[in-house]
Amino acid sequence: MPSVTKSVDLERPQEEAFALATDPARFDEWLTLHSAWPDGVPPAPEQGAAFKQKLTIMGMPADVDWKVTEFEPGARLVMSGEGPMGATLGTTITADGGTVSYEAEFSGGGIQGPMGEMVTKKAGEEIEASLAKLKAIA
């Protein structure tokens, strides 16, 4: 499964950095891949929670059905998602001290081979830009 991981130091205590990076109500302020919450902003993440998010990757909109598969308050959030045409996505957000890391994984559907490499490269650029925005609002 192609993946990309980027990190940023928010110069905040770990709990605060993690809370900011995982607050769905603030995704529109920093997460450039995020477009909307079709069913309304979900509550704070918790184990087993499910929600729908509209993303835009490489200019293409996609509705993703997410499920929180792991949640360690203040430290780790892992989500698995199902997108259009059989695509599967994974997102992991972690905090270690004030450093926040964001990992995105893509597979299935048309996201394989050269297309997977293109999506991964573009997602890496978007995540890097997103983390710069997150640092600016921290």
Image: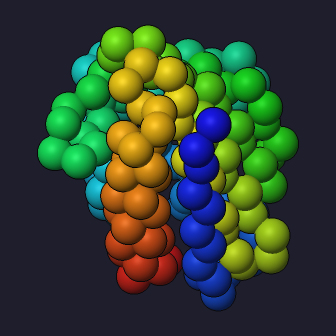
| Front one among 30 and 60 | 60
Q: Is residue 37 shown to the viewer in this render? A: no
Quadrant for the N terminus, please.
top right
Horizontal side of residue 112 vs 53, given as left or right: right
Q: Is residue 12 above or below residue 63?
A: below
Q: In this view, does 41 lie above or below 66?
A: below
- The residue depicted at 72 percent of the width and 78 percent of the height is 98
Image coords of residue 134 (percent x, y): 44, 71
The residue at the point 23 percent across, 48 percent down is: 58
Point out residue 15 in the picture as x, y percentages from the top left corner: 74, 63
Q: Is residue 3 above or below residue 30?
A: above
- Residue pictured at 59% horizontal, 49% vertical: 3
Q: Residue furthest front?
A: 113
Q: Residue furthest top?
A: 86
Along the line of sight, which residue is nearer the eye, 93 or 43?
93
For residue 4, say whether it is visible.
yes
In this rendering, position of residue 127 left or right of residue 40? right
